[in-house]
Image: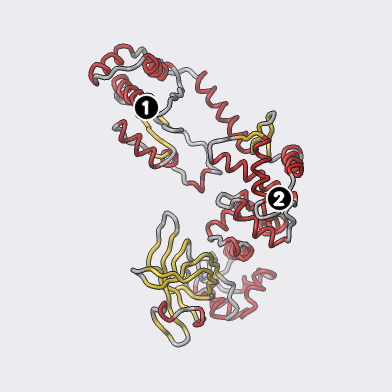
Amino acid sequence: MVCKFKSRLYINPGNGYTVAEYSSMELDCIPSEAVISNYGTEVTFTAFGKELPCMDNVEIEMEGDWKRSEKYGLQFGVDWSRVLLPKSREGIIGYLSSELITGIGPVMAREIVNRFGTDTFTVMENHPNELLAIKGITEQKLEFIIESYQKSAELRELMAYLAPYHVTPKKAEKIKQHFGLEAVTLLKENPYRLCEIKGFGFITVDPIARASKDLAPDEPERIKAAIQYVLRKGAEEGNLYLDSTIIVDMAYKVLNAGFPTDTVRRGQIKLAGNELVMKDKLLEADGTAIYLKAYREAEKEAAYHLVRLLRSPGNTYNIERELEAVLAKSKMTLAQKQEEAVRMVFRSQVSIITGGPGKGKTTILKIILQIFERLEKNKSVLLCAPTGRARKRLSESTGYPAFTIHKALYVTDDEMDNMEPEILEEDLIIADEF
């Protein structure tokens, strides 16, 4: 339905979840029990969803379903929304003076529309220099205006193309940044490239991609997308690479789901995999071990830095006196392997402590922290873990504050793909369940 923003009731700055009131003239789309108020031919209702547009004087298109809650009654749950390019004079004035366009306020917007009328957007697209006739628009301001207009136009086009995927404006912006100005063209040529974006897996993209291009089940671009999907799923489970036979078997199941057996043959999957390695350069092979190129490069970089740390000079400690004192004070006894692990930490710039549940890793950490505190009273310590639950366990078991790795690096999930290396300044860093 098409509507206009009235007022925002709630927003979560962290995830963009928004509750707001909107008005619409499409009365047949709005159940009577969802109506908050009635203004002639317009009714007001409440909508909720992620990153809902909250801009005055612009038309907004929404898709979703009416959902009922005991506390709030019937409200519109928005799956997808976008700001429309208006056609009326008042709508164009509202669009130009909205936050979508830089450098134009309500007064200037009205002057522009008074001069160009409903041809305003045509002028902005094809003859932008004509706007210099408007009082207050300099050449520098015109650059800002046209740049912001073009960005909003690109985003509108992308949002329209991505409508079947229920993409939020923030996610659409991320897609635009990834693919650049040719985002829509590239995705029309190969919709499976959307799988390159976090949050768009093969299972989500496949049915829409096949429908949009009428692709055969054994289309090479579909097979290649499934292979990369299998490798990404493997990475989510902690595997930087998978054996080629495992990849073929898993891709075979994914590609033939919902089709007769052997619609996509194993030989076709192997051929597509070879192309991804040899021609497209998106995969790397080390014998039968197959990596996504980005993961292979990450592994090499991690190995390089581990070697660098191991070879770098640093403090080495004789901890025998402190170890004895800490054990006596805590009335704990360590097994020989545990004592060796503690000594190793104070001899090396980087150490890895392994062991199954109940093997004494937490005890070792406690001893390490107490010894370090005795040796280096004025130096800092950082404890971190991959998840919130692991962070909490680490803090509770050691008595020290702990952080998620994301928090320690001051990054969010969305920033991880493009983040610059962050240098941590602490003197002792412990990463649990890493």
Residue at image point 62% right, 46% down: 229
| 170 to the left or right of 365 | right
Q: From the viewer's perspective, is residue 399 above or below residue 95? A: above
Residue at image point 34% right, 39% down: 392
- Number of other residues with Cα within 10 Å of mark 2, as a class: few under 14, some 14 to 19, many 20 or more: few
Q: In the figure, residue 431 lies in which quadrant?
A: top left
Residue at image point 68% right, 40% down: 248
Give me the C-alpha separation between circle 2 and circle 1. 46 Å
Q: Which amino acid does label 2 sit on?
A: Thr
Mark 2 — residue? 261
Say which element carries label 1.
loop
Say which element carries label 2.
loop
Residue at image point 71% right, 53% down: 260
Q: From the viewer's perspective, is residue 39 above or below residue 380? A: below
Measured from the top left, where is residue 114 in percent x and y?
A: 58, 81
Viewer-side residue, 296 vs 411 = 296
Measured from the top left, where is residue 309 in percent x and y?
A: 50, 23
Q: Earlier in the sequence, mark 2 or mark 1?
A: 2
Measured from the top left, where is residue 341 in percent x and y?
A: 40, 18
